[in-house]
Image (cartoon, grey):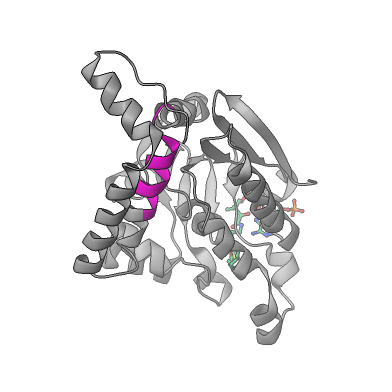
Amino acid sequence: MDFLLITPQARPGVALIQLNRPKELNALNGQLVREIRDALQALDADEAVRVVVLTGSERAFAAGADIKEMAGKTAVDMFLDERFATLEQIRRFRKPLIGAVSGFALGGGCELAMTCDMLVASETAQFGQPEIRLGTMPGAGGTQRLARAVGKAKAMEMVLTGEFISAHEAHRVGLVNRVVPVGQYLEEAFRLAARIAAMSPVAARLAKESINRVFETHLEEGLHFERKNFYLTFASEDQKEGMAAFVEKRKPDFKGR
Ligand code: CO8
């Protein structure tokens, strides 16, 4: 991995992936996106990992796709660009994925942040879809996922003006879960991750899958999907352990089985 730092057990059960292309503000070239996909696939298969935190640097989560790499491309080059399919694979990561965002999360960087299940932002974080200023538009979820996250009016404003929003604004409109001082964003993401890592990994995956279903289907089908996943949790040892622990007034010890 040339552009990533990976710590499989940054905290018990919690892995950390750090984007590490500092000079280019973590601009997403093809290799970096591929490396994120490969890292997530390895962590998905690692049973000791229950939650993953994805972060950049204090200055930039990611400043977007690599403009220098993209500038001379044709429509067919972009059509053939594997980054879009790779980002889709990242979105399919099955364990809880928490983004810890500081500094710039722009263009493809904002789109990458939106593939996370939750976001913890530092007060210095800025989110934006500035593609319009480059004479183009978002192409990896920046119109679809952003509108679902913040609503039509705010998404229109961000995508059509290209202006950034602050961490506090992102919190107000529902894009991020919490905003903390810059010295604390990673620690806060770990705290949130640790709380989830203490739960049943089976139930957490099924719950994540059910919430994501909201964006794919209508209510009746979504409720049906949710119910089946709920039933499925009763096939797990973790459900037996969780309910036994409650009855016996002790802390549950979830094994992910
Ligand atoms: N691509 C390539 N290089 C970049 C990028 C980028 N997106 N962003 C910053 N850099 C480079 C700069 O060129 C500069 O390099 P150098 O020192 O060699 O000139 C270095 O990073 C530092 O940047 P600045 O000097 O500009 O730093 P500032 O603090 O003055 O400004 C900004 C920081 C505001 C982040 C500014 O760099 C900027 O506006 N960057 C571009 C942001 C942008 O437009 N992003 C959207 C890109 S298009 C896109 O993402 C389409 C997504 C398609 C899907 C991809 C699927 C993964």
Q: Which is the main secondary structure of the residues drawn in magenta?
A: helix
Query: Is residue 29 positioned above or below 59 on the image?
Result: below
In the rendered image, residue 50, in percent from the top left (x then y), is placed at 51, 35
In percent of the image, x 47 and y 47: which residue is there? 126
> Dividing the picture into quarters, in which one does residue 250 lie?
top left
Q: Nearer the viewer, residue 12 or 131?
A: 12
Query: Is residue 168 positioned above or below 152 on the image?
Result: above
In the displayed structure image, the side of residue 136 where residue 224 appears, left or right: left
> Dividing the picture into quarters, in which one does residue 73 lie?
bottom right
In the rendered image, residue 200, in percent from the top left (x then y), is placed at 40, 33
Q: Nearer the viewer, residue 54 or 255?
A: 255
Residue range of the region highlighted in magenta in the rendering: 198-209
In the rendered image, residue 87, in percent from the top left (x then y), is placed at 58, 62
Query: Is residue 45 positioned above or below 248 on the image?
Result: below
Number of numbered discs on residues:
0
In the displayed structure image, the side of residue 209 where residue 25 appears, left or right: right
In the rendered image, the residue lying farthest to the left is 220
Residue 202 inside the magenta-drawn segment: yes
In percent of the image, x 71 and y 37: which residue is there? 5
In the rendered image, residue 6, in percent from the top left (x then y), is placed at 69, 36
Q: Nearer the viewer, residue 237 or 161?
A: 237
Residue 238 inside the magenta-drawn segment: no
In percent of the image, x 54 and y 61: which residue is there? 107
**The image quadrant in which ligand 1 is located:** bottom right
In the rendered image, the residue lying farthest to the right is 2
